[in-house]
Image (tube, rainbow, N blue to C red):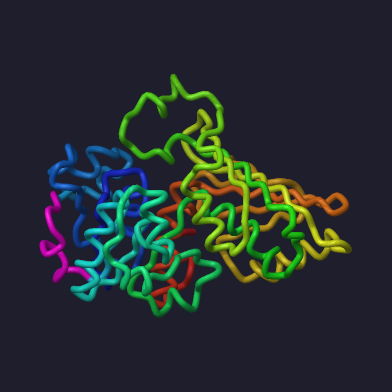
Amino acid sequence: MLKTLIVGASGYAGVELATYLNRHPQVNITALAVSAQSPDAGKLLSDLHPQLKGIIDMPLQPLSNAAQFADKVDVVFLATAHEVSHDLAPEFLAAGCVVFDLSAAFRVNEESFFTDNYGFSHQHPEWLDKAVYGLAEWQHNRIKEAQLIAVPGCYPTVAQLALKPLIAANLLNESQWPVINATSGVSGAGRKAAIGTSFCEVSLKPYGIFTHRHQPEIAAHLGISVIFTPHLGNFARGILATTTCRLNAGITHDDVAEAFHHAYHDKPLVRVYEKGIPSIKGVVGLPFCDIGFAVKGEHLIVVSAEDNLLKGASSQAVQCLNIRFGFPEAQSLI
């Protein structure tokens, strides 16, 4: 049994992690932790999230430093802010723990990425070199050997899963950058209350035009330039991405279908539609990314959908755990 710690367990991603890991036959949740300054410290997780009453009645222990738990656990999930993960991960790694980090603190092996997009200077280049990007369907072999897995962001997951098969099969005319328009529910902003993510205030609108920090993450791991425009929708959870591309001359609908089949026919958590187009309704509360597409001439539109808290965060982290330790990839997820 893997002795496991979840840090940041009271947040939306953290509670989903706790739910999946609690029913995992190879995992024992040793402790749930939050920041020592958190107002949730000392409370039961089930008091904050009553759907877990009688299921996970564990206290949220205040964490002041990694040494409190590092010698008591095998695996650590960090559902924490980027700067917090940046500081905590190396301490747990030095103690021999395997770390799954849901923040952006180790996602791109380029120090300027963090100063330019996240407002802090990265102090652990040695772990940037060693970290494996946890896009599960595309990094299986590297995840199996990793000690630090940087779980991708929600927008980067839904965008890359749609585009990577096309790039790998050399189907895209890269002179026209793929244009990704994606809409997320308000849970993507986290559990902390704010006017900008209040249901009474939110109206469908784009944000971060040409400046959103997930664009460089997407481009870095795709290896091509893209235009990415996120939108905030007045619904709780889920992401729908509509990506417009240009195909190379002579590429057909069947070529695109074959590229997706080749990439995902043996991947249990990506569902490719033979007919129709995915929706958020089809993925909310589920660990899948659903993909559909349409071709007209040299133009291709790909629609991908996921639950931002699950395939875009927690279920992908558990999927990476399963790969890392040789368990069935969808264990506890389906």
- Is residue 96 highlighted in magenta? no
Q: Quadrant of the N terminus?
A: bottom left
Q: Residue at x 43, y 74 (%)?
A: 143
Is residue 72 magenta-colored? yes
**Image-based side of 169 in relation to 210, left or right:** right
Numbered-mark total: 0
Give the residue at x 68% y 65%: 167
Q: Is residue 318 left or right of residue 208?
A: left
Q: Quadrant of residue 169?
A: bottom right
Would you place residue 320 above or below residue 197 in this image? below
| Residue at 37 percent of width and 55 percent of height | 114
Q: Is residue 95 above or below residue 224?
A: below
Question: Residue 200: where, in percent of width, then height?
Answer: 44, 19
Q: Position of residue 48 (x, y in %)?
A: 25, 38
- 75 vs 30, nearest the viewer: 75
Give the quarter of the image for residue 321: bottom left
Seen from the viewer's position, the closer of residues 237 and 241 is 241
Tell me if residue 72 comes above or below residue 314 in the rendering: below
Query: Going by the picture, which residue comes out furthest to the top?
Result: 200
95 up-or-down from 212: above or below: below
Residue 107 x %, y %: 42, 61
Residue 74 coordinates in the image, percent (x, y): 24, 71
Q: Residue at x 64, y 56 (%)?
A: 162
User: In the visual, does 302 lie left or right of 11?
Assistant: right
Q: Which residues are magenta?
A: 62-73
